[in-house]
Protein backbone atom coordinates (compact mmCIF):
# COMPACT_ATOMS: atom_id res chain seq x y z
CA UNK A 1 0.00 0.00 0.00
CA UNK A 2 1.47 3.33 -1.06
CA UNK A 3 1.16 6.35 1.17
CA UNK A 4 -0.15 9.47 -0.46
CA UNK A 5 1.66 12.68 0.42
CA UNK A 6 -0.72 15.54 1.27
CA UNK A 7 -0.11 19.24 0.95
CA UNK A 8 -1.73 20.85 4.03
CA UNK A 9 -1.28 24.40 2.67
CA UNK A 10 -2.97 23.38 -0.56
CA UNK A 11 -5.93 22.12 1.48
CA UNK A 12 -6.09 25.38 3.43
CA UNK A 13 -5.95 27.48 0.26
CA UNK A 14 -8.68 25.36 -1.33
CA UNK A 15 -10.87 25.83 1.75
CA UNK A 16 -10.21 29.59 1.68
CA UNK A 17 -11.24 29.77 -1.99
CA UNK A 18 -14.46 27.89 -1.24
CA UNK A 19 -15.28 30.18 1.70
CA UNK A 20 -14.56 33.31 -0.37
CA UNK A 21 -16.85 32.05 -3.12
CA UNK A 22 -19.58 31.27 -0.58
CA UNK A 23 -19.39 34.76 0.97
CA UNK A 24 -19.26 36.47 -2.43
CA UNK A 25 -22.37 34.61 -3.56
CA UNK A 26 -24.21 35.45 -0.34
CA UNK A 27 -23.17 39.10 -0.52
CA UNK A 28 -24.38 39.38 -4.12
CA UNK A 29 -27.82 37.97 -3.26
CA UNK A 30 -28.75 39.63 0.01
CA UNK A 31 -29.32 43.34 0.61
CA UNK A 32 -27.11 44.79 3.28
CA UNK A 33 -28.57 44.85 6.75
CA UNK A 34 -29.07 48.63 6.78
CA UNK A 35 -31.72 48.17 4.07
CA UNK A 36 -30.43 51.10 2.03
CA UNK A 37 -27.77 49.54 -0.18
CA UNK A 38 -27.72 46.49 -2.38
CA UNK A 39 -24.85 44.82 -4.20
CA UNK A 40 -26.02 43.50 -7.55
CA UNK A 41 -22.92 41.55 -8.56
CA UNK A 42 -20.31 39.39 -6.93
CA UNK A 43 -16.51 39.37 -6.72
CA UNK A 44 -15.58 43.04 -6.36
CA UNK A 45 -17.49 45.58 -4.33
CA UNK A 46 -16.00 49.01 -3.69
CA UNK A 47 -15.94 50.18 -0.09
CA UNK A 48 -18.40 53.04 0.41
CA UNK A 49 -19.21 55.58 3.09
CA UNK A 50 -22.54 57.41 3.14
CA UNK A 51 -22.88 60.18 5.68
CA UNK A 52 -25.03 63.18 6.47
CA UNK A 53 -23.85 66.79 6.25
CA UNK A 54 -25.87 69.93 7.10
CA UNK A 55 -27.09 70.49 3.53
CA UNK A 56 -27.60 66.85 2.51
CA UNK A 57 -25.56 63.67 2.19
CA UNK A 58 -22.19 62.60 0.81
CA UNK A 59 -21.30 59.24 -0.70
CA UNK A 60 -17.65 58.27 -1.01
CA UNK A 61 -16.56 55.15 -2.86
CA UNK A 62 -13.03 53.76 -3.06
CA UNK A 63 -12.28 53.01 -6.71
CA UNK A 64 -8.52 52.32 -6.78
CA UNK A 65 -7.15 51.67 -10.23
CA UNK A 66 -10.49 52.47 -11.88
CA UNK A 67 -10.40 55.39 -14.31
CA UNK A 68 -13.20 57.93 -14.68
CA UNK A 69 -14.39 56.31 -17.90
CA UNK A 70 -14.64 52.85 -16.31
CA UNK A 71 -17.61 53.49 -14.03
CA UNK A 72 -21.00 55.14 -14.26
CA UNK A 73 -23.11 56.95 -11.67
CA UNK A 74 -26.81 57.47 -12.27
CA UNK A 75 -29.89 58.53 -10.33
CA UNK A 76 -33.28 57.25 -11.36
CA UNK A 77 -36.55 56.84 -9.46
CA UNK A 78 -35.00 57.83 -6.13
CA UNK A 79 -32.14 55.36 -6.44
CA UNK A 80 -28.44 56.05 -7.00
CA UNK A 81 -26.59 53.36 -8.98
CA UNK A 82 -22.82 52.99 -9.21
CA UNK A 83 -21.68 50.50 -11.88
CA UNK A 84 -18.31 49.63 -13.29
CA UNK A 85 -15.55 47.09 -13.50
CA UNK A 86 -12.21 46.69 -11.83
CA UNK A 87 -10.00 44.83 -14.26
CA UNK A 88 -7.03 42.67 -13.27
CA UNK A 89 -3.58 43.83 -14.31
CA UNK A 90 -3.34 42.81 -18.00
CA UNK A 91 0.41 42.16 -18.01
CA UNK A 92 0.36 39.59 -15.19
CA UNK A 93 -0.52 35.95 -15.76
CA UNK A 94 -3.00 34.87 -13.05
CA UNK A 95 -1.13 31.57 -12.70
CA UNK A 96 2.06 33.37 -11.67
CA UNK A 97 0.63 34.84 -8.46
CA UNK A 98 2.04 33.67 -5.15
CA UNK A 99 -0.56 35.75 -3.34
CA UNK A 100 -3.57 37.59 -4.79
CA UNK A 101 -5.77 39.69 -2.52
CA UNK A 102 -6.88 42.49 -4.84
CA UNK A 103 -10.24 41.39 -6.28
CA UNK A 104 -11.45 42.36 -9.70
CA UNK A 105 -14.73 42.09 -11.54
CA UNK A 106 -17.88 43.96 -12.40
CA UNK A 107 -19.78 45.74 -9.67
CA UNK A 108 -23.10 47.48 -9.26
CA UNK A 109 -24.28 49.11 -6.07
CA UNK A 110 -27.71 50.63 -5.60
CA UNK A 111 -28.61 53.02 -2.81
CA UNK A 112 -32.13 54.18 -2.05
CA UNK A 113 -32.10 57.94 -1.61
CA UNK A 114 -34.29 59.80 0.86
CA UNK A 115 -37.10 61.78 -0.83
CA UNK A 116 -35.50 64.98 0.46
CA UNK A 117 -32.54 64.73 -1.99
CA UNK A 118 -32.64 67.23 -4.88
CA UNK A 119 -31.68 65.14 -7.94
CA UNK A 120 -31.16 68.25 -10.09
CA UNK A 121 -28.28 69.44 -7.86
CA UNK A 122 -26.36 66.17 -7.39
CA UNK A 123 -22.65 66.62 -8.18
CA UNK A 124 -19.78 64.14 -8.36
CA UNK A 125 -15.99 64.30 -8.43
CA UNK A 126 -13.32 61.61 -8.83
CA UNK A 127 -9.86 62.25 -7.39
CA UNK A 128 -7.03 59.95 -6.29
CA UNK A 129 -9.17 56.82 -6.67
CA UNK A 130 -12.07 58.16 -4.57
CA UNK A 131 -15.47 59.01 -6.03
CA UNK A 132 -17.40 61.63 -4.07
CA UNK A 133 -21.08 62.22 -4.80
CA UNK A 134 -22.74 65.19 -3.09
CA UNK A 135 -26.47 64.71 -2.60
CA UNK A 136 -27.97 68.08 -1.56
CA UNK A 137 -31.33 68.35 0.15
CA UNK A 138 -34.21 70.12 -1.50
CA UNK A 139 -34.08 73.85 -0.74
CA UNK A 140 -37.30 73.64 1.31
CA UNK A 141 -35.72 70.94 3.49
CA UNK A 142 -32.76 73.09 4.55
CA UNK A 143 -34.78 76.24 5.12
CA UNK A 144 -33.63 78.23 2.08
CA UNK A 145 -36.16 80.96 1.39
CA UNK A 146 -38.14 80.21 4.54
CA UNK A 147 -38.34 82.18 7.71
CA UNK A 148 -39.05 80.40 10.97
CA UNK A 149 -41.66 82.25 13.02
CA UNK A 150 -42.05 81.37 16.67
CA UNK A 151 -45.56 81.68 18.08
CA UNK A 152 -46.57 82.24 21.69
Image (spheres, rainbow, N blue to C red):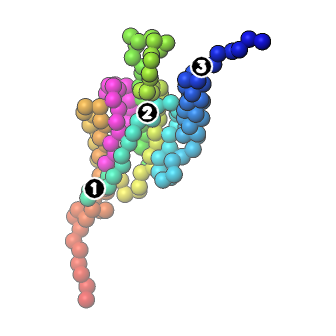
- SS at mark 1 in the image: strand
Residue 6 appears in the picture as rendered? yes
Residue 64 at what x, y percent from top left?
A: 33, 29
Q: Is residue 34 left or right of residue 152?
A: right
* The stretch drawn in magenta includes residue 30: no
How much space separates mark 1 and mark 3, taking CA atoms?
Answer: 53 Å
Q: Which residue position holds label 2?
A: 83
Q: Earlier in the sequence, mark 1 or mark 3?
A: 3
Q: Is residue 62 left or right of residue 101?
A: left
Q: Which residue position holds label 3?
A: 7
Numbered disc in front, either 2 or 3: 3
In this picture, which residue range is highlighted in magenta?
58-77
Q: Residues within 10 Å of mark 2 (few under 14, many from 20)?
A: some
Residue 30 at what x, y percent from top left?
A: 57, 44
Residue 85 vertical placement versus 53 (above, below): above
Q: Which residue position holds label 1?
A: 53
Amino acid sequence: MALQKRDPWGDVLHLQEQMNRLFDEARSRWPHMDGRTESLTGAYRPAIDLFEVPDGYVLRADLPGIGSGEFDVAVENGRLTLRGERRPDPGIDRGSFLRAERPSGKFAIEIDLPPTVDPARIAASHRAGVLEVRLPRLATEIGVGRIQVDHD
